[in-house]
Image (cartoon, rainbow, N blue to C red):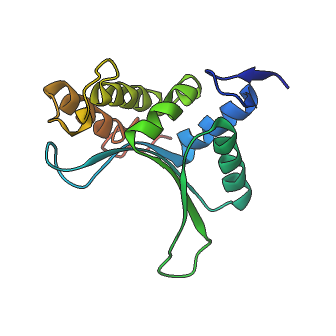
Amino acid sequence: MEQTTLHGVNQQVSLEMMGWLCGILDGEGFIGLRGTGKRPYGSQMAIIQMVNTNNLIVEKYISLLKTLGVAFHIRELEQKYPRRKQWQISTLGFKRCIKFLPLIIPYLVGKKEAAGMLLELINSRLNLNSSSVGNSKRQWSDYENSLADKIKFSHRKSIFPKTSTTIC
């Protein structure tokens, strides 16, 4: 199994495991924004999240996040009626996501576009070339609002037609 050091990360993760991690995110994950209201007054938070019921998958996902040095929150979701336990693993916030996104973007397929736009938005919001304090509290620019809208719209795309057809 080939080992590679990823983008200055001290720990080593195989390309196979990075592919697995990003495959899980592509299939079971969410990469985008979570908000408490409309911009510019509402709070918008970057989020990379995966929800799953399989304990082995959850444990492997968490193990890889720890190895990569990615901060995360985990919680068990409450169910209204009997179901299998669900775990939600989330990396929240611009500063946490900006560390995770460059590691996963090269391996994503379905969520690559949204992840790239989210990274661009985070860089703009944090304005990494600026030494000003409190820059994240400034009002959103038209460009940032446009990016945020594109990120949200990217989750609504469908490859299927809006009308149903029968294929025989």
Seen from this angle, which residue lies furthest top? 129
| For residue 166, side relative to residue 163 (left or right) | right
Q: Identify the residue shown where x is 36% and y is 41%.
A: 155
In the picture provided, is 63 more to the left or to the right than 109?
A: right
The structure residue drawn at horizontal position 58% and vertical position 75%, both measured from the top left corner, is: 83
Percent of width and height locating residue 45: 33, 46
- The answer to which quarter of the image holds residue 24 is top right
Outermost residue toward the bottom? 81
Between 20 and 141, the residue placed more toward the observer is: 141
Res 133 → quadrant:
top left
Q: Is residue 118 above or below residue 84?
A: above
Residue 70 lies left or right of residue 155; in this view the side is: right
- Against 28, residue 113 (above or below) is above
Q: Is residue 164 visible?
A: yes
Does 37 sit above or below residue 101? Answer: below
Q: Position of residue 18 (x, y in %)?
A: 67, 32
Instruction: Tell me where residue 116 appears, x and y as whole percent.
Output: 41, 25
Q: Is residue 96 above or below residue 54?
A: above
Taking depth in this image into account, of 97 and 117 the one nearest to the observer is 97
Q: Is residue 141 left or right of residue 92?
A: left
Question: 65 or 83, which lies in front?
Answer: 65
- Looking at the image, the residue that sits furthest to the right is 1
